[in-house]
Structure formats: C-alpha cells, structure tokens
Amino acid sequence: MFGDKERYSVGLLSNPKNDVKIEVPHELVDQKMHPLRYRSFYYGDYLDYFCSTFKENALDAFIGI
C-alpha cells in the first residue's frame, strides 16, 4: 500500500448454528454435467470432525461422495 493514511481491515465471518443442515439444492444437481459431490450434513457434526482431525481435506473426507 502507498500513502500515509492508516487503514483498517475487518474480517466479517458468520457460522451457522450447529443444528443447521447444509445441503445442495436439488435443482443444482444432475447426473451428467453437475453430479452431487457432497452429502448433506449438520454443521455441528462437521465442525466436531474438523476440530478433532485438522485434516487439510476435511470436507472431502467427512462428506465426500
């Protein structure tokens, strides 16, 4: 960055509640061009898995098809 003014950055993050089910809308999936790549899951279950394994590919390992 150039200049002499101070700048501030703010990270805005949101997480669903643990009992929220995450799933792909059915209208976005077809067997030819856009097959389903992930099963539906509850956010809390995934968060528990991720925090207990710290795998780089945690999403694929947890719910990948």
Image (cartoon, rainbow, N blue to C red):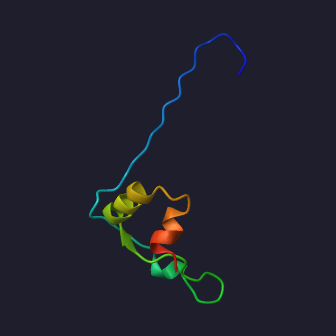
Count of numbered marks: 0
Instruction: Give whichever of 37, 55 is nearer the camera.
Output: 55
* Residue 52: quadrant of the picture: bottom left
Which residue is at 45% across, 70% downward? Answer: 62
Instruction: Give whichever of 33, 41 is nearer the camera.
Output: 41
Which residue is at 38% across, 62% downward? Answer: 49
Q: Identify whether 9 is placed above or below 56.
A: above
Instruction: Give whichever of 23, 50 is nearer the camera.
Output: 50
- Residue sitting at the far left: 19
**Quadrant where the N terminus is found in the figure:** top right
Q: Identify whether 8 is placed above or below 51.
A: above
- Residue sitting at the far front: 53
* Residue 16: quadrant of the picture: bottom left
Q: Left or right? Give the position of 33 relative to 61.
A: right
Which residue is at 46% across, 73% downward? Answer: 63
Image coordinates for residue 26, horizontal then vertical, percent: 46, 81
Which residue is at 51% across, 59% downward? Answer: 55
